Each structure stands twice: as structure tokens, then as C-alpha cells.
Amino acid sequence: MLKIDIVSIFPEYLKPLELSLLGKAQEKGLISIKIHDLRKHTTDPHHSVDDTPYGGGAGMVMSAEPWGLTIDEISDNTTQFDLIILTPAGKKFDQQMAIEFSKKENLIFACGRYEGIDARVGKYYAGQKNFNVHEVSIGDYVLGGGEVATMVIVEATARLIPGVLGNPLSLKEESHTLTNKDGSLVEYPNYTKPALWRGLEVPEILLSGNHGEIAKWRIAQAERRTQELTEE
Ligand code: ADE
């Protein structure tokens, strides 16, 4: 079972993870998701989690110690953990990374806010023998914090775990799992009944029953769409 621990100063922000596919996956015991409040691990009376940056500059930086205390409480010295620190300066998340994460046993997500987390947190855990540390971004834009990014990654990762999706075959032919010799493709267009809607017909080939030709047509469509995306 994949165990997911998420650390945030806004635990309520992560409530949607209890719903729908991920809620069911937890009920079925395929994954577990625990949300931790960073402020529970502050030692000062104001429960502060941030401070001004060394070297000056705008904004605040999240202090290392509350993160250290929280991650220490979640982890132990022997189990293997993957610590995922959300930051716009991280490696870009993609389907390949989702596949990699879905094969792990323990994922800890650190949702930074403000100007990010003191850089020594990642460095410290990278130095622990039972930790892998990944700095991850979900795209080239800046969010208010790592919570939404965590939800994106957890959803993309959890649906790859066997049993989470009702029909595992739907994983086979979707965007970014479809490949040709040049790499990953986005999905071909899909249609359902009726065959004629507001004057628009379903491509005839899909009604032909010729599965070989349909498969060829779909690959060609996926290639065309992928090509169009790279031209923009
Ligand atoms: N925190 C702020 N922006 C982010 C992004 N694009 N990806 C991950 N974490 C973030």
C-alpha cells in the first residue's frame, strides 16, 4: 500500500483528497493519505513558521525546524521515504514521474508557502540514508503554495496504482501513455452516441467495425494533435 503524508499550514486545503477516486482508494485500503499541520510542530508561543531571508530580499522563508520536527515524526530511520518538496524551482512533473512515484511505498509531500522552505531541509534529508529528496514543480507558473501542486501529483500518481481505477484498460490508451517512435503522444479524439449531434458527424471510420483501420486512424490523430501542440 502506498502511504502518503502531506505537510501543510493549511490542512483544510487538502480536503478534496477525501473525495471521489482517491476517497474510494483509501476506503479500499489501496492508499493511505494523512495530512499534518506544520504549526503543531512550532516551539514558540506565536506558532510562527517563517522568518526573514538571510541576505535580505522580499518575502519570508519557512523555518527549517518545524519541518524537521514534523518529518521526523512521520518517518523513522529504517523505512524508505521519498520526500517531495513542492517548488516552482523544481523538476517539472510529468507522467513518467507519476509512474515512478506510484511504485514507491512512502511519499511525504512538503507544501511550502511564501518564498519557500529553508534550503537546508532538503539537504538534510537528502543526507539521510533512507530518504530520497525530489524538488518538484507542476509547471512554469507560481502558485500561492504547494497544496494544489500536491493534489495534482497525488491524483496523477494514485490512479496508476492497480485497483484504483475501475477499468485498468483505460490507462492503456490515454494521453502520455500512448507512444510512437518519437515519444509520448496526447490522446486521439473520442466520440460517443449519438452519431449525429448538432449537424456534426462521428468520423466514419469509427463506425466501420474495422479495428485495424481504427487503431491506425487513432494513432494518426494522436500524432496530429501532438504535432499541433508543439507548433503553438
Ligand atoms: N509552489 C508555487 N508554485 C509552484 C509550482 N508551480 N509547482 C510546485 N509548487 C509550487
Image (tube, grey):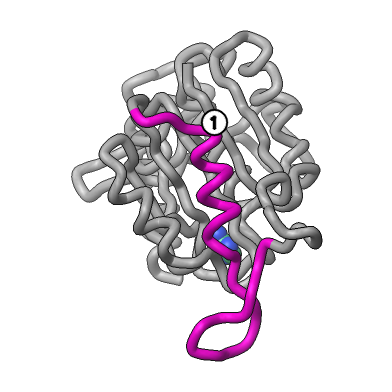
- Of residues 112 and 29, the one nearer the viewer is 112
Rendered image quadrant of residue 73 = top right
Where residue 10 sits: x, y (%)? 75, 50
Magenta stretch, residue numbers: 49-77
Q: Is residue 38 left or right of residue 182?
A: right
Q: Dot 1 corresponds to which residue?
A: 4
Asked if 210 appears above or below 65 in the picture, the reply is above
Dot 1: element: strand
Which residue is at the front of the view, 164 or 28?
28
Q: Amino acid at mark 1?
A: Ile
- Say if residue 220 shows up in the picture: no
Q: Position of residue 102 (x, y in %)?
A: 42, 29
Q: Is residue 133 above or below residue 177?
A: below
Q: Is 71 one of the magenta-colored residues?
A: yes
Instruction: Tell whether position 169 is magenta.
Output: no
Between residues 110 and 209, which one lies in front from this camera angle? 110
Position of residue 174 measured from the top left corner of the image (x, y, whole percent)? 46, 33
